[in-house]
Amino acid sequence: MGSDRPPPPAGAAQPRRLSWDVLRASAVLLVMLYHATWLAPRWHPELASHGVEFAYPVGASVLLVVSGYFAGVSVRRGEPLRWWIGRLCRILPAFWVAVPVTALLTVVFSPADWWSPTWRDVGANLLMLWQWKPQSHPFVDSSYWTLPIQLVGFTAVLVAARRRRGGAVRLLLCGLVVEVALWPVRVYAAAEPFRMVYDGLGLYRMHLLVAGVAVYLLAAGRVGRVPGFALVAACLAAHALQTLEVGTTIGVAFGIGAVCAAALGPDWDVVVPAVVRPGVRWLAGIGYGVYLMHQAAGTVVMRRLHDLGAGRSVQVLGMLATGIVLGWALTVWVERPAYRALTRLRDRMLDRRSPRPARR
């Protein structure tokens, strides 16, 4: 879910399409609204009060679909291994900094009666062990759940990209069938080792990345409209099967529809007022940092505002502001410089191993 950007088409460079920035910024805001208005009051009842609630966890799901789409777009532009290492360079450094920083903020500023992570919890989160043994390794920030899904999904895309033409579609179908077929085993079989692997690798939401790649195949003309949309519909059916929540499934359906519109239709710049475009692009650009930093630290800010007598709206704005400020700092000070440095190192190492052909 890093700060991917749509690659320019072959030929003359063109400005980045606004559609994708609108999707990313909107999805990040939905994630924060869900955590601030629904999840935080249920985890901490003292924060509950009358007010508007957004009870649908759709924002992170839409971000996963977008990640799947751009995985399909960008992996075709060069050497797949180079692309895969680049994804790791984008995702992991910011995450590895976000975990201890969030833990430190939580320990220092949380009320005495709230749970605070230990350094053992920090280590387990850095290794992404929360779904392998959740009773022993609680989340430092619950937003982290999408990261193993992306890492496993990007690895699957790497494998698919190395196959001959047509193999990618079959691999997507096989992956979706395996995920759905194993879901009843996950739910009804009392097999802890199986649950650990299924949940730990994030297989329960792999269909969201598959949906994004399927949209890319549609947009690129690598699959026909009927089988392409059928694959997208199958991914949505898998989501409905696993969540059993009508409202959430409808929200994800709208999100996938928006991804299809962005990929297959014209840019949205004609409907987005010019005055808000810079803000949309800016928020989309720091979206990964905001996603990593907003939930745990923002909930602490909500509690402190509650103690000061602030109302529900101010508390929600407090989480949003916390996520944006900390997310901006993480993006500017960690994610971008780390990505630049690590990809330069990657290129030197890969070029030394297998030099690129000289341009004529």
Image (cartoon, helix red, strand yellow):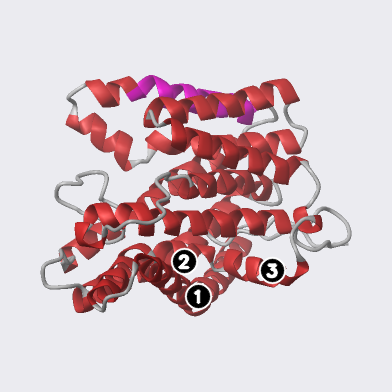
Q: CA distance from mark 2 to mark 1?
A: 7 Å
Q: Residue at x 52, y 38 (%)?
A: 252
Q: Is residue 88 above or below residue 331?
A: above
**Which of labels 3 and 1 is toward the front?**
3
Question: Can residue 82 be seen from the camera position used here?
Answer: no
Q: Which residue is mark 2?
A: 290
User: Which residue is denoted by mark 3 in the rendering?
Assistant: 276
Among numbered discs 2 and 1, the one appearing first in the sequence: 2
Residue type, label 3: Val
Around disc 3, counting alpha carbons within 10 Å, would you say few (fewer than 14), some (14 to 19), or many (20 or more)? few
Q: Secondary structure at mark 1?
A: helix
Residue 328 on image: x %, y %: 50, 75
Find residue 15 and report its image quarter: bottom right
**Mark 3 vs 1, N-terminal side:** 3
The residue closer to the viewer here, 298 or 307, is 307
Q: Nearer the viewer, residue 160 or 184?
A: 184
Q: Which residues are magenta?
A: 167-183
Q: Are marks 2 and 1 in contact (CB under 8 Å)?
A: yes
Marks 3 and 1, how far apart at CA:
18 Å
Is 205 contained in the magenta span?
A: no
Q: CA distance from mark 3 to mark 2?
A: 19 Å
Q: Quadrant of the C terminus?
A: bottom right
Label ID, residue 328: 1
Instruction: Identify which residue, 283 or 149, lies in the foreground.
Output: 283
Q: How many residues crowd mark 1 within 10 Å: few (<14), some (14–19), many (20+)?
A: many
Magenta part, dominant SS: helix
Seen at 74% across and 38% down, the residue is 219
Amino acid type for the residue under numbered disc 1: Trp
**Residue sitting at 37 percent across and 71 percent down?**
97
